[in-house]
Image: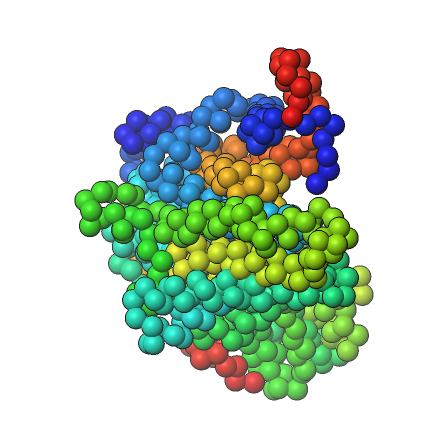
């Protein structure tokens, strides 16, 4: 076993241990992606980008790994922990069960999980208030829509996506006094729904046929089909997670930003500076965890009026004057 | 199946040909590894050491192998009746439902290990029931089993997706999975079993189902070559028309064979759901049912060959994971390429080396081929 570990370490030398800074700072960060894979143009890739930025700014390298099946979750977590990696960031709610077990086995290792709460003394749970960001894009959609009808296309039908939908609907209702209509569809009930741009496009088209002129996609790679369908029909769409305005310039109204990159970067930096804390980090508008995108690609479509309304709502949410209901709290949406 | 030009001695057929095939697959894989700028010999070493170099690796290898033995046997038993069951993936998936329902809801009535035993039987029953429909359609309605079982994989996927998302999921839980099972109903893992004996085995998902898999392999061998039903299965596989003359009802044999196949596929649920995950998760079969086809082909549909082929695939899965772990350049997609090459050479191109090997052996031995 000892020989095996030393062989492993020498194998890793080039990647992780060669950096003198890693020894000096005493952090060996690692990222383990979900089954969706590292370069998914949205969620996992956001974490990768955050880790890359950390590497650039701090000079500390990180290890990352994509798993192949569910049986490997505990295996790779245990392995990373045994090899002294810390903090270890796991990407996605599917890690919760495995992490809950491994966190007990390695009480001195720092773990992180995104999109889920794992209540252990050495786990940092990073969750986002997607409902707040979705509320803002809902306000923007309502202020921009000419037909008074807007659409929402979700990925897999899980509470997390209903949380996006519910925040969006609340934003639309807030901006119009409940007059606008919101069409909502989920792409499917299996993980395949995250990667089905054709069906996403069809759902968007049907919503457009029913009169929607803005469609918000919260559906991973499926969303690219939604954005394309809206652009083809000369309507507007709203992207999600990363800034997707550039995909169809002038056709994407804005994007609901979920800063997993910032969260990852901050978590690793805190570990390096010795300020890493376990517990729940709920990142909303106030914490800069979610936002809407304004950039060179959407300046022609995002009107000053809509932006002002969204900014006002943002200030009110931060000040606590508006509370956006979280669907996952009671599995219900107020409207 | 198709008759070779020259009959080979049995040892060459079951050992030499598969070995040559695997060697060829590894050779091509080595070239691919070389092309991405890694040392192929080192990669092979990492793969083998990662899978067999210590008890932890061996535990994971045998855990994967257990699933492959079941899916391989399920495919093989149908081969003997001339049926190509592609639906093992779906049958194993639905079998997971049977095992999960028993573990979740009958815990109060079944004490101790009887819960696990009933759950295993329920898994086999659900797997068999799901295979029964394509089997019936093949036997009575001449609907080709390849087509129906392919489609039944989608039926299984949709059914389980619905149940896990809308019915069985804990409210508010994001993962599409059932709540955890009560732990007294688990199939025990070896590291737990060996602890009281003072033997330290690292924590791995390797569990008692492995022994059940070996028992099933022996059972399938005994069934196929030592019983009247096995004779009937082989007769129908060789020539259904002739089998009728022998007083055998092909329809009955087809249905019974697919039932047995589905039940064997259900063994995977015992290994993964009851032995490791202790909850039913979405898509838990992860393609192992399809790998079972490769395992059955490579094992030449003989239980002994299937056990060996299953262990080889276990090595590829576990060693592949270690390889991806130790060599960041070799991503998980590379591992799929290597596994795919083994399937290609062992399954699709299994007869490629048959003629040269036969010629070589014929030159070496003077005795006429048997």
Q: x, y percentage for residue B68?
A: 51, 46
Residue A57 falls in which quadrant of the image?
Answer: top left
Q: Quadrant of residue A240?
A: bottom right
Query: Can you say which quadrant of the picture contains the N terminus of chain A?
Result: top left
Q: Determine the residue positioned at 72% across, 31% down.
A: B4
Left or right: A151 with respect to A55? right
The quadrant of the rendering that contains the C terminus of chain A is bottom right
Number of callouts: 0
Left or right: residue B4 compared with residue A239: right
The picture places residue A239, in percent across and down from the top left corner, at 63, 61
Viewer-side residue, B247 vs B191: B247
Q: In terms of image quadrants, where is residue B32?
A: top right
Q: Nearer the viewer, residue A237 or A114?
A: A114
The image's colour scheme reads: rainbow
* Residue at image coords 33%, 72%: B110
In the foreground, A310 or A59? A59
Q: List x then y, in percent, for residue A296.
A: 66, 54
């Amino acid at each position: 076993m000892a020989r095996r570990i030393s062989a492993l370490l020498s194998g890793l030398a080039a990647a992780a241990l060669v950096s003198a800074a890693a020894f000096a700072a005493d952090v060996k960060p690692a990222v383990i992606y979900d089954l969706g894979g590292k370069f998914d143009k949205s969620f996992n890739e956001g974490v990768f980008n955050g880790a890359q930025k950390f590497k650039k700014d701090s000079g500390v390298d990180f290890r990352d790994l994509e798993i192949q099946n569910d049986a490997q979750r505990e295996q790779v977590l245990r392995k990373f922990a045994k090899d002294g990696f810390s903090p270890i960031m796991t990407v996605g709610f599917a890690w919760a069960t495995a992490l809950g077990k491994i966190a007990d086995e390695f009480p001195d290792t720092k773990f992180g999980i995104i999109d889920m709460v794992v209540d252990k003394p050495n786990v940092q749970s990073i969750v986002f208030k997607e409902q707040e960001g979705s509320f803002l894009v809902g306000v923007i959609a309502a202020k921009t829509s000419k037909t008074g009808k807007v659409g929402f296309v979700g990925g897999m039908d899980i509470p997390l996506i209903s949380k996006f939908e519910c925040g969006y609907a609340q934003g639309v209702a807030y901006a119009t006094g409940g007059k606008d209509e919101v069409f909502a569809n989920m792409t499917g009930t299996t993980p395949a729904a995250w990667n089905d741009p054709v069906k996403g496009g069809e759902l968007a088209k049907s919503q457009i046929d029913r009169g929607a002129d803005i469609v918000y996609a919260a559906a991973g790679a499926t969303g690219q089909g939604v954005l394309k369908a809206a652009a083809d029909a000369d309507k507007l769409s709203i992207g999600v997670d990363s800034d997707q305005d550039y995909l169809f310039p002038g056709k994407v109204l804005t994007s609901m930003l979920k800063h997993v990159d910032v969260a990852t970067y901050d978590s690793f930096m805190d570990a390096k500076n010795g300020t890493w804390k376990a517990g729940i980090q709920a990142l909303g508008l106030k914490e800069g965890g979610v936002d809407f995108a304004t950039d060179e690609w959407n300046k022609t479509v995002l009107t000053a009026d809509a932006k002002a309304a969204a900014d006002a709502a943002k200030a009110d949410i931060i000040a606590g004057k508006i509370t956006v209901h979280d669907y996952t709290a009671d599995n219900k949406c107020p409207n | 199946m198709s008759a070779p030009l020259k009959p080979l001695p049995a040892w060459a057929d079951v050992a030499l040909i598969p070995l040559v095939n695997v060697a060829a697959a590894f050779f091509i894989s080595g070239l691919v590894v070389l092309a991405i700028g890694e040392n192929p010999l080192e990669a092979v070493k990492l793969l083998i050491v990662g899978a067999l170099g210590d008890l932890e690796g061996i535990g994971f290898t045998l855990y994967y192998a257990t699933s492959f033995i079941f899916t391989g046997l399920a495919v093989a038993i149908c081969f003997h009746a001339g049926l190509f069951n592609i639906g093992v993936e779906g049958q194993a998936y639905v079998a997971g439902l049977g095992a999960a329902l028993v573990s979740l809801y009958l815990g109060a009535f079944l004490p101790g290990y009887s819960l696990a035993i009933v759950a295993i039987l329920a898994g086999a029953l659900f797997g068999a029931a799901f295979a029964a429909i394509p089997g019936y359609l093949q036997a009575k309605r001449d609907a080709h089993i390849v087509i129906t079982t392919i489609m039944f994989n989608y039926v299984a996927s949709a059914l389980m997706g619905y149940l896990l998302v809308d019915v069985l999921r804990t409210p508010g839980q994001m993962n599409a999975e059932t709540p955890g099972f009560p732990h007294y109903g688990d199939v025990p893992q070896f590291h737990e079993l060996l602890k009281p004996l003072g033997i330290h085995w690292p924590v791995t998902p390797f569990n008692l189902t492995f022994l059940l898999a070996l028992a099933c392999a022996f059972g399938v061998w005994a069934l196929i070559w030592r019983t009247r039903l096995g004779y009937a299965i082989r007769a129908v596989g060789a020539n259904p028309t002739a089998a009728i003359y022998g007083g055998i009802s092909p329809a009955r044999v087809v249905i019974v064979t697919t039932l047995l196949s589905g039940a064997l596929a259900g063994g995977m649920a015992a290994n993964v759901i009851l032995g490791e995950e202790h909850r039913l998760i979405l898509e838990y079969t992860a393609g192992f049912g399809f790998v079972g086809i490769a395992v059955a082909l490579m094992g030449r549909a003989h239980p002994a060959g299937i056990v060996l082929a299953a262990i080889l695939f276990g090595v590829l899965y576990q060693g592949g994971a270690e390889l991806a772990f130790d060599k960041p350049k070799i991503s998980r997609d590379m591992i799929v390429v290597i596994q795919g090459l083994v399937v290609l050479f062992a399954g699709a191109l299994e007869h490629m080396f048959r003629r040269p090997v036969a010629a070589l052996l014929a030159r070496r031995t003077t005795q006429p081929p048997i």
